[in-house]
Amino acid sequence: MELTLASSASAKTALLSCRQMRLGSPKLPNVWRSSLWRSRSSRRNTSLRTLALSTTVGLGNTMETPAANAQNVNYMWPDKKRPRICIVGGGFGGLYTALRLESLVWPDDKKPQVVLIDQSERFVFKPLLYELLSGEVEAWEIAPQFSDLLANTDVRFFKDRVKCLYPCDHLGTSAPTAGTVHLESGLLVEYDWLVLAIGAEAKLDIVPGAADYALPFYTLEDAHRVDKKLRELERKNFGKDSAIRVAVVGCGYGGVELAATISERLQEKGIVQAINVEKTILSNAPAGNREAALKVLSSRKVQLILGYFVRCITKGVEPQTSDAEPKSIDSAADHSESVTLELQPAERGLQGQTIRADIVLWTIGSKPLLPQLEPSDKPYDIPLNARGQAETDETLRVKGHPRIFAVGDSSTLRDRNGKLLPATAQVAFQQADFAGWNLWAAINDRPLLPFRYQNLGEMMTLGRYDAAVSPSFTDGLTLEGFVGHTARKIAYLIRLPTDKHRVQVGINWLLKSTVDSVATIQTMLTKAQSGS
């Protein structure tokens, strides 16, 4: 496998055709003009000679892309005849689409070459991020490396960040490529088929001060950052009477799971306050899950501040209290690094509030990353809705782009009732299965299948060995406590990407459960003996 300077005739022809049909001008995009100039000047500069990177014949290897300051290079696919599929994003939508393509049976001359691109070297099983805070799982269990997951496949992985997309399939050209993906490292990847699975990021710019003083809980890095902050606060308050104040903004699934997990971790050493604009928590969840969550939060003394939204977050301002009002347990503590949240009622009849927190966790709002990939010289070649998601038909193809599919947070689809599908792992997992099949169908000239979402139920963690599961096949049934926790872990174990990883994680979980059970029995026997 080689990478050479971007002087491929097919690449130049494709981009030239795109620009001519769009603007009536032979002028190429800047990225291609710079590549051609560098190609000519490379004879005079030995440091800009042809770049060639080779890998072994072994499949599933991680491809090291050029350095960020390297000149643009064109990725040379191993086979010039077989279809080329580029998957952008390695979350549930992207990785599982790649694995689905690998599992299908292909004619020898049509088995596609697949490249998966993600800015991280690890796939993150996001529903289990909360268990990192409780210490119930280890990072390798829920964040395996792509190189390990793809080791026995034909899929090649690039650790890189996408800079721009240059689709050509909407122009009706006869160019030998459907488009090009431009990576920040300078690598240019031509493709015949493109899968957009870039996902989204936390939206912190909707409230003044949130970007500066609030911590999102969206990625593996976010989880490590929150855990590190909690450890610092725990060390700082060790042996003191002061309580660690935690403010969780949002009471959807993410906010409730965080509040339950952290309140269990801190116990009497923490005060957890959960803020929600609505008058209830989990407004769109099954009643059984909502009731189970309220029971757990109440037992752990989580303070619910409902019917309020955060107006702004500021640094180190004392909340206003009357002179006659007694000081709380943490009033005498050192909160020099604390922040203040100004809360405004969402409806009449409520008074504004000001609360102080040592750590603010933000769980509301997300924004798709697709708009950031639109080239400045030709924005919105890909049709986007108001939220920044690609407009797709029911087969998951982007409208007007017959060779581009979008899944997960990058796509917008509605259920049979006309309601937008939620941005959940369950939706992305199912879409990946359909996207892989429809790519097979399109390459083999077969009819594509319309995507139909099947709601299998909703699950949530409520702390260590506690969860709530409401399966869809039985109305009114909710599994709570240890039973719900076990059912949830088994369900997610089945959903892990590969058989090898499932076996490794399953064995580790079984060993942990055995050790914990033995420790619990020993504790009970010790108490019984001391009591007698």
Image: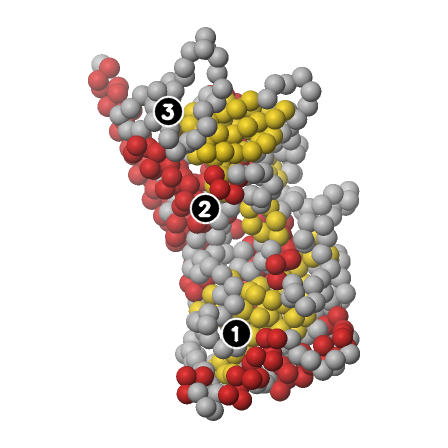
Instruction: Depth check: give the residue in front, 53 or 97.
Output: 53
Residue visible at 57% across and 79% down?
A: 34
Task: Kindly report the distance in space between the C-alpha atoms of the residues bearing marks 2 and 1.
Answer: 28 Å
Three-letter code, disc 3: Ala
Three-letter code, disc 1: Leu
Secondary element type, mark 1: strand
Mark 3 is surrounded, within 10 Å at the Cα level, by few (under 14), some (14 to 19) or many (20 or more) other residues, namely many
Q: Which mark is residue 299?
A: none
Is 182 situated above or below 289?
A: below
Residue 524 image position (x, y, % from top left): 29, 24
Residue 192 lies in quadrant: bottom right
Circles 3 and 2: CB atoms closer than 8 Å: no
Three-letter code, disc 2: Asp
Q: Which mark is residue 243?
A: 3
Task: Kindly report the distance in space between the C-alpha atoms of the residues bearing marks 1 and 3.
Answer: 51 Å
Secondary element type, mark 3: loop
Q: Which residue is mark 1?
A: 187
Instruction: Depth check: give the residue in front, 503 or 222.
Output: 222
Viewport quadrant of the C terminus: top left
- Quick check: can you spot residue 524? yes
Mark 2 is surrounded, within 10 Å at the Cα level, by few (under 14), some (14 to 19) or many (20 or more) other residues, namely some
Task: Kindly report the distance in space between the C-alpha atoms of the residues bearing marks 3 and 2.
Answer: 23 Å
Residue 94 lies in quadrant: bottom right
Q: Which mark is residue 222?
A: 2
Secondary element type, mark 2: helix
